[in-house]
Image (tube, rainbow, N blue to C red):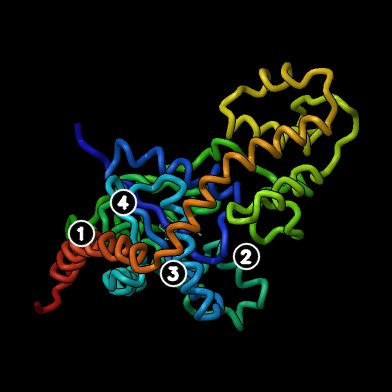
Amino acid sequence: MIIKRVLSGIQPTSDSFHLGNYLGAVKQWVALQDAHDAFYCIVDLHALTIETEPSLLRKRTLASAAQLLALGISPDKSTLFVQSQVSQHNQLGWLMECMAGFGEANRMVQFKDKSSKTGADSARVGLFTYPMLQAADILLYQADLVPVGEDQRQHIELTRDLAGRFNARYGQTFTIPQGYILKAAAKINDLQEPTSKMSKSSGSAAGVIEIMDAPEVNAKKIKGSITDTGSQVRFDEKEKPGISNLLTIHSALSGSTISALESEFAGKGYGDFKAAVADLVVEYLRPIRNKTLELLSDEGHLIEILHQGAAKARTVAATTLETAYKRLGTVA
Ligand code: TRP
């Protein structure tokens, strides 16, 4: 059996992952590491495309690593590393910038979205070249599969185009990766605005379940989640988006089907149901939060795990970069 290579990345842009990050992405990363050769990268260089306080970048990079480990990424099964520790990312990133057309890069919707917030004129050039660095992240490892959310589809397409163009012009160098678009095992929505996805840029913190929040805080958020009309616990995204979201969360964490939950809570009110979801979430997250705090309490050990990951990543990345340079005609 040929073991496929998987690569994905996550930006260290918050102190805590939220439940949507876990159920939408990290849970799949954990599942993939068993039967794949998985590389998971904390993309700190990508986080620099938006002005970031140095102490926060450091804190969030370590917090991301600790949470990924606590959520089940195993350093024995996966290569977990920090992007800036593997200098080949920047080096191949430049080569990808030299492969990409300006117009092509200008069509990336994520750039348009993110730059429209400040106006394209004050957006960083790095925000514009972000997708070429992302292509380098993927191609350095000859990844077959790239598990990402729907919003990254266009960046994966660009990566495939750039790899194909390079291979056609200079000879076979890169594996053409496939996007593995995560059907968010559970699409988790905001607790206060249950028709939009749970997200760190959400309007109010009350709608987002943070993994690192104290258990009481999360229990309160769930009990205080928006109350739909009616009184029956039933999955109906149109009429009862709030309750449907809580059913999805319960089902994702408990493994019960939605219909089993509807029967279990038949005749009970929203209050009882919310209390049950709050208990479930709190007990699910408690050991994960504790494990994260434990990992963060020994920074030296955590950094050592990341150094080992970076060393493994570097050997693969260096081989690919060397081939790419050679194909391009640089003098070694
Ligand atoms: N752009 C991705 C996101 O915002 C993060 C990312 C960077 C990534 N490099 C990657 C994802 C490589 C997959 C593969 O979610």
Q: Name the residue under label 1.
A: 316
Residue position for label 2: 113
The quadrant of the image that shows the N terminus is: top left
Q: Tell me the amino acid under the disc marked 3.
A: Asp
Q: Is residue 59 in view from this perspective?
A: yes
Secondary structure found at label 1: helix
**Residue ranking furthest to the left:** 332
Query: Is tag 1's residue or tag 4's residue first in the polypeptide sequence?
Result: 4
> Could you say where residue 41 lies in the image, as x and y percent from the top left?
38, 59
Q: Which residue is drawn at 71% across and 53% down?
A: 217
Displayed quadrant of residue 81: bottom left
Q: How crowded is mark 4: few (under 14 residues within 10 Å), some or many (20 or more)?
A: some
Q: Is mark 4 on a helix, strand or loop?
A: loop
Question: What residue is disc 4 on?
Answer: 75
Residue designated by label 3: 44
What amino acid is labelled 2 in the image? Asp
Crowd around label 3: few <14 · some 14–19 · many ≥20 (10 Å): many
Q: Label 2 to label 1, Cα distance in Å? A: 33 Å
**Quick one: SS at disc 2?**
helix
At numbered mark 3, what does the secondary structure look like: helix, strand or loop?
Answer: helix
Disc 4 residue type (three-letter): Pro
